[in-house]
Amino acid sequence: MPIDNVFEIKNLSTSFFTRDGEVQAVRDVSFSLRRGETLGIVGESGSGKSVTFLSALGLLAASGKVKGGQALFNGRDLLASSAKELRKVRGKDIAMVFQDPMSSLNPLKTIGKQVAEALEVHTGLGRAEIRRRAIRMLEAVRIPEAAKRYDSFPHEFSGGMRQRVVIAMALICGPSLVIADEPTTALDVTIQDQILRLLRELKRESDSSIVFISHDLAVIASMCERVVVMYGGMIMEEALIGELFESPAHPYTMGLLRSIPVIDQDKGALLEPIPGSPPDMLAPPPGCPFVARCVHARAVCAVSPPPYREVSKTRRSRCWLWADDAPVEGNVFKERSAAYARA
Amino acid sequence: MAWYVAKRVATMFATLFAVVLLTFMLMHSIPGGPFTAERKLPDAVEQALVKKYNLDAPLHEQFIDYVRGLLVFDLGPSFKYEGRSVNEFIAEGFPLSSRLGLMSIVFILFLALPLGCVSAIKSGKWQDLLIMFLATLGITIPSFVIATALMYLFSYRLGWLPVFGVSSVKGYVLPVIALSGYSLAFITRLMRSSLLEVMGQDYIRTARAKGLSETAVLVKHAMRNALLPVVTILGPTLASLLTGSFVIEKIFALPGMGIHFVTSIANRDYTAIMGITIFYATILVAMVFIVDIFYVMIDPRIKLQ
């Protein structure tokens, strides 16, 4: 394993065992994250984005079980660590920023205390120093009059302010990996923009790696260098952000891109939603999870899962159209490659 | 805070006035009177009694008279027992009933909260199933059955505890357990479901993500949130425990408030019924008031406006 990979997920599978049966939320997911990199994870609700990281950190709900795989943090497998060892990593080396700032703060504790808490757990600093650092952190996330607001309760803050608090809470120990799980989804667009700007500024000031989980490709594009596209608990495609927009290497990504509005688009042009709905993870299709909604589907797609193939040095795709024996005629990817080769 | 308390006290008095008015009206509108007995009194005697207790005056005058008495904490004479006042009934019964009630609430809290927590933490495991089984029994089995069963086992068979009376401390054990049964089971269940709900909240996951241990998550983040519904129910529970239970007092032959209340109804003892009802209402309103103050102290979201 190359040493510059700060975080690496290998063949991770996670299921939730419910009354109705086994929900296979994450199926054989692998990717890695380089030191200082910002990686985007995109996919619709239920695609397994969050569960992948909750699995790695041991934060799954009681019904969730990791069935196999590794989650390597600086070469150490978190899934093989004891609960106690994992606790030492959580909040100190790996921090999470959660989605909903309304519910991810304890309503009965002051925001200052909640921000300071990770320091209390992971450092032996004195009370006064902890308070001083927490206030400095609140200032860093641009909370006005941070010292005064230290003793405020969450309900006295607006949504955007609370999300700043949640970010401060995550960054207080200077983690080397920050997992931001839809940090702007619950906010309106102007506040969303402020928070994204803040995250980019904070990113510039530190050398930590960031995983940015979102269902919004536009948000991912503004934050990340590289992106992993998930669907039905599997990774469909992995690419640099520019490549992904320019030449998506998976039919699902193509569909995603077509459903994004473009500002100087022809007014008559309609957005194209992807028809159909995501697969039932209680009984996922034996082949490609996207097969039922894919316009390029071949017979093989419904039968066996496509291999995860390297398409170029920087990208991989899980699609039967990339297979060596796939027909060239009418094959978007092969025709495109052929065109590149001719040019 | 002072303004809030003042406002709450004002509404308390308004509530109590409504209770007084309602019980007074109800008492005077039901047929029959305190002096209608199976063996009819001679007319002259009955009229003399009616006159003595001012029952021939217009209703509003009687009411004003009654309220005037209430203002100086005089609940009036008993209609049934010559020469005794309702104040005396309460003074006799309340100390014992409230002592039993206080012991019960302490017993309940010391058992129900830990049991509820264990049940929630071990949700689905044998500890949870056992505690929930017992709690369901506690809710479904009436207190008189529990009381007689306890009596049979500990007093009759084993001879450890007295059958009745509270002449020694031992005498309190069985009545307290029997009196607590229902509330103990109810609060255990409430604590369990409340804690389970809180443990599923996002901020609990946030706390875990910070690296807090499970114990720290429970003590520092979950407990206070989970206690809110329990605190709410504590006011009415305490009020009903303090004012005594007819059944328990009857079974263990304890001279408490509950007995007076029930016998006064059978006796058509107007003033005693009204007096004890008003006394009960006062305690209930006071308990709810204390709980509300307590609530403001635990939950910063509640505004004092």
Image: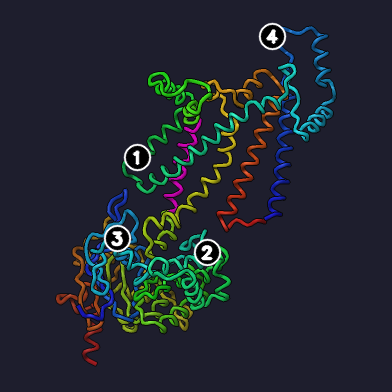
Residue receiving disc 1 = B129
Q: Nearer the viewer, mark 4 or mark 3?
A: 3
Q: Nearer the viewer, mark 1 or mark 2?
A: 2
Q: Nearer the viewer, mark 3 or mark 1?
A: 3
The overriding secondary structure of the stretch rendered in magenta is: helix
C-alpha gap between disc 3 and disc 1: 26 Å
Q: Is residue A232 visible?
A: no
Which amino acid does the dot numbered 3 rest on? Ala
Task: Looking at the image, tell me whether mark 2 or mark 3 is earlier in sequence order.
Answer: 3
In the rendered image, residue A17 lying in the magenta stretch gets the answer: no
Mark 1 and 2 residues: CB-CB less than 8 Å, in contact?
Answer: no
For label 2, the SS is loop
In the image shown, does A315 or B292 lie closer to the viewer? B292
Q: Is residue B149 left or right of residue B58?
A: left
Q: Give the residue at the far left of this rendering.
A: A325
C-alpha gap between disc 4 and disc 3: 78 Å
Q: Nearer the viewer, mark 2 or mark 4?
A: 2
The residue lying at 31 percent from left, 82 percent from top is A240
Residue receiving disc 3 = A83
Work out whether A95 lies above or below B284: below
Which mark is drawn over residue B38?
4
C-alpha gap between disc 1 and disc 2: 36 Å
Q: Chain of mark 3?
A: A
Q: Position of residue B237 (x, y in %)?
A: 55, 38
The residue lying at 22 percent from left, 91 percent from top is A342
In the image shown, does A15 or A141 lie closer to the viewer? A141
Q: Chain of mark 1?
A: B
Start-end of magenta stretch: B179-198
Q: Give the residue at the far front of this rendering.
A: B168
Q: Is residue A95 visible?
A: yes
